[in-house]
Image: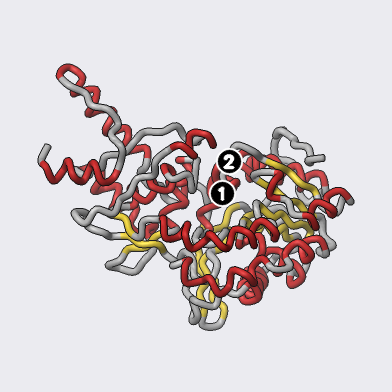
Amino acid sequence: MSSLQKSILKSKLPPSGINFGLNSRLSKTKSLQRKRDYEPVQWSMYYDHSKDIKIGDNTFHVYTRGTEGPLLVLLHGGGYSGLTWAEFVKSITTMVVCRVMAIDLRGHGDTVTTDEEDLSVGTLALDVAAIIEADGDNNSIVLIGHSMGGAVAVRAASLIENLCGLAVIDVVEGTAMDALASMQSFLRSRPSSFSSISQAVEWCVRSGQIRNIQSAKVSVPGQIKNIETNRLATHDIDAHLKLASIDYEEPLIQREDIIPEEEASNMAPPTPSSSTLVKKYIWRIDLAKTEQHWFGWFKGLSSAFLNIPAPKMLLLAGVDRLDRELTVGQMQGKFQMQVLPACGHAVHEDVPDRVAEAIATFMVRHKFADPASDFVRTFPAC
């Protein structure tokens, strides 16, 4: 191994062990397996269609699946895309009869608008309402949003005809407002670029941003874009896999599909920022530049959530995230709450099956949808 190769290896990841002599063949086999662990996968494994919806001069990108049942409109968090719901969609559609539409919100994914910087919650809510209306044939709507997307779902609820239910995932006004002070520090701690899609997938898993490798492999390409083409990394996956099958190899660390919380907290994230590497991908959206909208996303969220007349569900990664107003509302039975511990902020990616079970139970309980299988029913938190 050359000194340059050693330098690159040390700058990116902790060593994964060294094999000598008779173990060299086994080492090579494991290296190939490690490489496959982080290879991206296409959206077509999870959705039936990937399409654009034109609204005026704006083009909104959506992923859809299913042909009957209520429509689940899925809204991702800041920095993510509609692909963040892939593993959840795979699970929920086996549990209840439903259709799904995962939207790339303004400034994210493959959506292209005339004003990419207007990420105010009001504008995003109007976008969602317009997309649903343009899609047509939406007799029963269930809005489901994660983080920023949850705040958008709450604000969009009053704009949606035929809304029958609302589910918000891991966003609470009090906790979110407290976290804003440290958000810029968190964003600065992330690498600004990656040399390949696989490297970005690995970083997201190793850093704990997404603890489910299968979800990360489909979700992360929707979060980064090619510097040269200015297109989303999803458009490069076929070429990437073809190159990888020939001669491409990166030093990657093998992990189980889901990273336990205690392990994720102790893992040192890779730092793929060596100047010796060619930087090809950057984040699709610069979240640091959206700071002017953060306060508006979450201010008054709890009150707005409680005032929605439709049946509501709140899914949290920990009970400590509940603020006072929601605690009182939950004790008064104004919404159903479910706590899913041992996962990170991206709850629907870390434990998609459990989130699907909770939402499927919620939908069947309120007769929004018919069960498609005998799935495990969950019980609301007390």
Residue at the spot 40% in from the left edge and 56% down from the top edge? 190
Residue 161, x across and y down, in percent:
77, 69
The answer to whether residue 237 of the structure is visible from this angle is: yes
Q: Quadrant of residue 194?
A: bottom left
Q: Quadrant of the C terminus?
A: top right
Instruction: Tell me the amino acid under the disc marked 2.
Output: Cys
In the displayed structure image, the side of residue 250 where residue 200 appears, left or right: right
**Image position of 74 with respect to 339: above or below:** below
Q: Mark 2 points at which residue?
A: 343
Gap between marks 2 and 1 measured at Cα: 8 Å
Is there a contact, CB below 8 Å, between mark 2 and mark 1? Answer: yes
Foreground residue among 139 and 230:
230
Residue at the spot 27% in from the left edge and 28% down from the top edge? 17
Q: Mark 1 points at which residue?
A: 346
The answer to whether residue 134 of the structure is visible from this angle is: no
**Image position of 30 with respect to 239: above or below:** above
Q: Quadrant of residue 277?
A: bottom left
Residue 370, x across and y down, in percent:
76, 45
Residue 316, x across and y down, in percent:
68, 47
Q: How crowded is mark 2: few (under 14 residues within 10 Å), some or many (20 or more)?
A: many
Looking at the image, the residue that sits furthest to the right is: 332
Foreground residue among 112 and 53:
112
In the displayed structure image, the side of residue 36 where residue 261 appears, left or right: right
Foreground residue among 302 and 69:
302
Foreground residue among 182 and 92:
182
